[in-house]
């Protein structure tokens, strides 16, 4: 007996399609979230690159004979390089060598490097590299560090199914759209499309568009970096109110797993400079508390 799907009643066809989509969705979700964060091949490749980094640092320190000890994998995304002997290093060379080597690994675009003192685990030097170059945090270049026992700690931003599961998650989105198209109520099918206008903040002659990451001052458009736009959005939501440093750091960096210190002052300074042509608006320091977007008039 031949099964004729087209001649089935509409309700049964929709039921069969629904069951099929549910089954495919469960299968794809299992594939997307049942895989390891970083495959053993990727981890092995990362360890080789880090061992080569340790080798280059020893050569730059004038040491061509002592060993780079076995690379330690602290967590799925954190590694440590230890050395047999003391070494010295130039921050510039450490930065450039690290960026050159890790650029060969497409999964490791965001990471933090800390140079630790062996005995105390205090941070002797460190920097952060982000996907967007303007968000890099690189302090104190050009100062040679003394010869001591150092550990290089490298923490990568977790992948979290982001790059390797794009195809699978894209398929889930397509399935969700099909489900909505097939099973949505008729009242929704006839409902007119209503555009939701994007919120734009107005402060006198200044307009801030958080979606475009732009300031418009007297018809002149000023582009903001992603971090500057996040800062401006927090201030724009609460003008003339003090925003604590801890809140700014948490909402902009710590929620993404990166903790920073002086970089907040740097980005505040950059944002303040872009507003310096407007006399009625300024970002002021509230001593001992944080910052405030002061809007006069």
Image: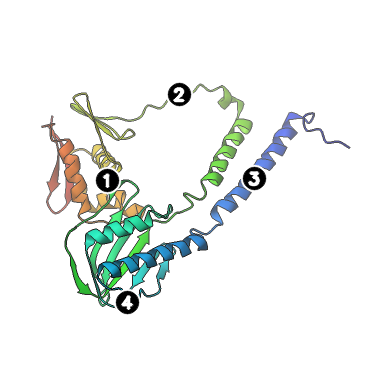
The residue pinned by badge 4 equals 65
Q: Residue 140: percent from the left, percent from the top?
A: 18, 58
Q: CA distance from mark 3 to mark 1?
A: 41 Å
Side of 41 relative to 234 (left or right)? right
Disc nearer the start of the sequence (1/4): 4
Q: Secondary structure at mark 1?
A: helix
Q: Secondary structure at mark 4?
A: loop
- What whole-number distance in Å separates the C-alpha atoms at marks 2 and 3? 32 Å
Q: Nearer the viewer, mark 3 or mark 4?
A: 4
Look at the image and tell me in which quarter the C terminus lies: top left
- C-alpha gap between disc 4 and disc 2: 70 Å
For the residue pair 95 and 164, the one nearer the viewer reads as 95
Q: Position of residue 128 (x, y in %)?
A: 29, 56
Write the residue at 13% across / 47% down.
Answer: 285
Quarter containing the N terminus: top right
Instruction: Work out whether residue 233 can be spotted.
Output: yes
State the separation of the CA atoms marked 1 and 4.
Answer: 38 Å
Q: Position of residue 10 (x, y in %)?
A: 73, 29
**Which tag, 2 or 3, sits closer to the chain's start?**
3
The residue pinned by badge 3 equals: 24
Q: Nearer the viewer, residue 85 or 284?
A: 85
**Residue highlighted by disc 1:** 134
Mark 4 / mark 2, whichever is N-terminal: 4
Say whether marks 3 and 1 touch (CB < 8 Å): no
Name the element at disc 3: helix
Please say if the residues under marks 3 and 4 sit with CB atoms less than 8 Å apart.
Answer: no
């Amino acid at each position: 007996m031949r099964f004729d799907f087209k001649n089935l009643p509409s309700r049964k066809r929709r039921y069969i399609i629904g069951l099929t989509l549910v089954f495919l969705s469960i299968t794809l979700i299992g594939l997307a979230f049942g895989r390891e964060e970083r495959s053993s091949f990727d981890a092995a490749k990362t360890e080789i690159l880090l061992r080569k980094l340790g080798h280059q640092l020893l050569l730059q320190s004038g040491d061509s004979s002592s060993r780079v000890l076995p690379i330690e994998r602290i967590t799925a995304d954190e590694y440590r390089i230890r050395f047999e002997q003391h070494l010295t290093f130039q921050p510039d060379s450490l930065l450039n060598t690290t960026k050159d080597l890790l650029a060969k690994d497409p999964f490791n675009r965001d990471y933090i490097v800390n140079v630790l003192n062996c005995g105390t685990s205090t941070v002797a030097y460190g920097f952060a590299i982000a996907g967007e170059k303007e968000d890099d945090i690189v302090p104190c270049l050009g100062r040679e560090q003394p010869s001591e026992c150092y550990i290089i700690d490298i923490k990568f931003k977790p992948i979290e199914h982001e790059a390797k599961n794009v195809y699978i998650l894209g398929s889930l989105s397509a399935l969700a759209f099909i489900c909505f198209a097939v099973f949505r109520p008729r009242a929704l099918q006839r409902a007119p499309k209503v555009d939701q206008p994007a919120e734009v903040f107005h402060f006198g002659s200044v307009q801030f568009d958080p979606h475009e990451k732009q300031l418009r001052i007297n018809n002149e458009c000023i582009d903001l970096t992603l971090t500057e736009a996040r800062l401006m959005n927090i201030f724009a939501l609460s003008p003339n109110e003090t925003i604590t440093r801890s809140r700014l750091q948490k909402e902009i960096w710590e929620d993404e797993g990166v903790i920073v210190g002086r970089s907040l002052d740097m980005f505040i300074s950059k944002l303040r400079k872009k507003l310096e042509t407007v006399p009625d608006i300024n970002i002021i320091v509230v001593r001992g508390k944080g910052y405030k977007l002061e809007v006069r008039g």
